[in-house]
Amino acid sequence: MKLPTLSLHHHHHLTTPFLHNAATVSLSRSTRVSNGSPFAVRMSLKEDGPSVAIVGVTGAVGQEFLSVLSDRDFPYRSLKLLASKRSAGKKVNYENRDYTVEELTESSFDDVDIALFSAGGSISKKFGPIAVDKGTIVVDNSSAFRMDDGIPLVIPEVNPEAMEGIKLKSGKGALIANPNCSTIICLMAATPLHRRAKVSRMVVSTYQAASGAGAAAMEELELQTREYAFNLFSHNAPVLSNGYNEEEMKLNNKSVKVTATCIRVPVMRAHAESVNLQFETPLDEDTAREILRNAPGVVVIDDRAANHFPTPLEVSNKDDVAVGRIRQDVSQDGNYGLDIFVCGDQIRKGAALNAVQIAELLL
Amino acid sequence: MKLPTLSLHHHHHLTTPFLHNAATVSLSRSTRVSNGSPFAVRMSLKEDGPSVAIVGVTGAVGQEFLSVLSDRDFPYRSLKLLASKRSAGKKVNYENRDYTVEELTESSFDDVDIALFSAGGSISKKFGPIAVDKGTIVVDNSSAFRMDDGIPLVIPEVNPEAMEGIKLKSGKGALIANPNCSTIICLMAATPLHRRAKVSRMVVSTYQAASGAGAAAMEELELQTREYAFNLFSHNAPVLSNGYNEEEMKLNNKSVKVTATCIRVPVMRAHAESVNLQFETPLDEDTAREILRNAPGVVVIDDRAANHFPTPLEVSNKDDVAVGRIRQDVSQDGNYGLDIFVCGDQIRKGAALNAVQIAELLL
Ligand SMILES: NC(=O)c1ccc[n+]([C@@H]2O[C@H](COP(=O)([O-])OP(=O)(O)OC[C@H]3O[C@@H](n4cnc5c(N)ncnc54)[C@H](OP(=O)(O)O)[C@@H]3O)[C@@H](O)[C@H]2O)c1
Ligand SMILES: NC(=O)c1ccc[n+]([C@@H]2O[C@H](COP(=O)([O-])OP(=O)(O)OC[C@H]3O[C@@H](n4cnc5c(N)ncnc54)[C@H](OP(=O)(O)O)[C@@H]3O)[C@@H](O)[C@H]2O)c1
């Protein structure tokens, strides 16, 4: 499996303006603007911006796309909202303009510069190449293209260089894939440490939110019905012949040995991951904490005295991935091991935000 | 830290009658008898049985003691129910007899053969030695004596030989400690594998139920208030200077290197643990599954096709520890690694049941 990050060339500092270094005191918040007020008109609608389409706009990730684009003042000349026939005709007021959701068809991508896809793998497989043929640059949230060798799999903080050849207004369409949400959240923390001390093996156990399984699962949790009634269970992805489920295999990596156990917990939003790291060269916990404090898109919450560490609730609707419980692994000699606990909003950094950051690299 | 199990002499088969081999099809259930019916009179009240006291009988574990003693027809000549002044005078109908909860005092242990303690560490520290002086054998559920070298720490399926010197009616009192609940649940699965292939290192991530933190936490979860509102958090035990919390350090072991991350999840009852094992000699997953199927007190739930694996809900109120997701660790070469997922009722096998099994070894 081809994943970005750990197997990539080291790329120490990103200078793109949208990648800030997170402060350790507060997580970066999305500043939402009330659309009702005339004083709140966003400046994102810009004549020289790209034309943008959102495929799957009515879904959990699709809705988050709208919110992230607005929060980040992503410039766009026009916006096309696409979903299935079921939702076609629905009215959406967005940044003080009225839009109508259109049915996704083969002609949806005429004059679309950037298409953000989040309508599931089969839609991506069918309509992704159609869009590319029209000259559209597709950023895809599904697993459809993640394993294709010609298609970059990008986390902007980790491997922006992977999409260097792809340019807006070149007349040439292209596909860029968003990694799996658990992978993004894990690698946001692991990559800065890997750059310093080379991770040789990772043992990951996840605590994944219901919202990762879509709107229906969120509703089920809200009602405390069936599996979600104060219970947890092995991830719903199919189990392969080697005993790992597909979600766990997505955490695999060419250059680093990874074993993962993915579990769904009765949490509404944001994934948590317990990550044990083995390094090739020594790395003490103070250096690790310092590296993570300086890592873009990462915030350190690690107050042992107050027992204050990352929780899903605290990172919900936040951009940054939070890391805490940073400690020397007592089961490994020397400074060759660390345990960390990571939380990230998988709809935001694990999906919509990461895709919009990719789109920003195109501007 | 001194823990039983992995560091102990191998003890392959237990022949004590109450340690059955669990069937793989169903977990052993507690068969409860309605106390109201005259036909349901239990036979546990026996003239030649020991006199038994329960310290902390009104608590979560204390209540479970009553239920386990009844389920297992534990013979007793007399029963003394002890708690704090607050609960003294409360009436309890148990196995068709009326009892009154008494206040725990220094004279509570006159003529008590076995005392089951679950009233917290400070009560154990104070009253445990007093009981021993009176000739009582104390089985303690708190952490008070777990690290004392002279006091056996026992899981009956793992190291019953540790309490060999302790005998009822010898006139000599003694202390026996119950290991921490997460430790018991983990070792029920890890020990049978360790006996075959010697575990050299374990990476454990827990998913711990609210009930592990007592009745108040259960109520909080029920109300979905504060921390428990669809959230999870690092275990509430104090964090030590090495960054591990006390709960995590309890999983440590003299002979095996262990690193643990302990997390509380919004689950009512029963703990889950994701356990990565490294072995000194090769062990393939089929052999491991077979070993676990034959392990006393363990049930294997490992249906990949149906995605059916252990869940807290399924093991709640059950005696057996359930193991599933048994698979070769892809991050380790050869057959030197396994990942497993374990669930167990921490009030039952993690506390009351284990203590009663210890008491049964005295009979
Ligand atoms: N949820 C997450 O945390 C997360 C994280 C990372 C990646 N992803 C990926 O993002 C994708 C969407 O996930 P989600 O959670 O947002 O799912 P969701 O809430 O179920 O939304 C699905 C979206 O796809 C649209 N759709 C379905 N069939 C369609 C069709 N035939 N033509 C056009 N649109 C169609 C739906 O539109 P209608 O309203 O018309 O049905 C809806 O907008 C999936 O590939 C998922 O794996 C999700
Ligand atoms: N819950 C678990 O899953 C679990 C698992 C393994 C081990 N343990 C251990 O078991 C112990 C009890 O846990 P729990 O969850 O059952 O707690 P709990 O529900 O809070 O019950 C505490 C019990 O201790 C009694 N008690 C308190 N102060 C006392 C005093 N001064 N004198 C006599 N009795 C007193 C209480 O009686 P009143 O009604 O009079 O207050 C009550 O019966 C703890 O050491 C805990 O670490 C618990």
Image (tube, coloured by chain):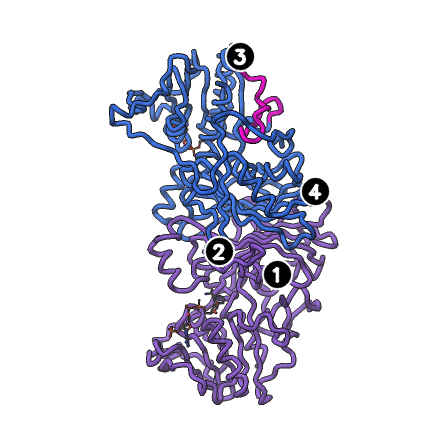
Chain colours: A purple, B blue
The CA span between labels 2 and 4 is: 31 Å
Q: Is residue A307 visible?
A: no
Choose mark 4 or mark 3, whichever is in front. Answer: 4
Residue in front for this viewpoint, A128 or A93: A128
Please give the residue where the numbered disc 3 appears in the rendered image.
B172
**Within 10 angstroms of label 2, few (less than 14), some, or many (20 or more) residues?**
few
Residue at mark 2:
B305
Q: Secondary structure at mark 4?
A: loop
Numbered mark located on residue B280 in the image: 4
Residue A301 is left or right of residue B9, and the answer is left
- Mark 1 vs mark 2: tell me if same chain: no
Residue located 55% across and 87% down the image: A135
Q: Is residue B193 above or below residue B45?
A: below
Residue, disc 1: A252
Q: Are marks 1 and 2 in contact (CB under 8 Å)?
A: no
* Whole-number angstrom distance, CA of label 3 to CA of label 1: 58 Å
Q: Looking at numbered disc 2 in the image, what kind of residue is underneath it?
A: Ala
Task: Answer yes or no: is residue A276 visible.
Answer: yes
Q: Is mark 4 within 8 Å of ligand 2?
A: no
- Label 2 in the same subunit as label 3: yes
| Circles 2 and 3: CB atoms closer than 8 Å | no
Residue at 38% across, 37% down: B215
Magenta span: B148-167
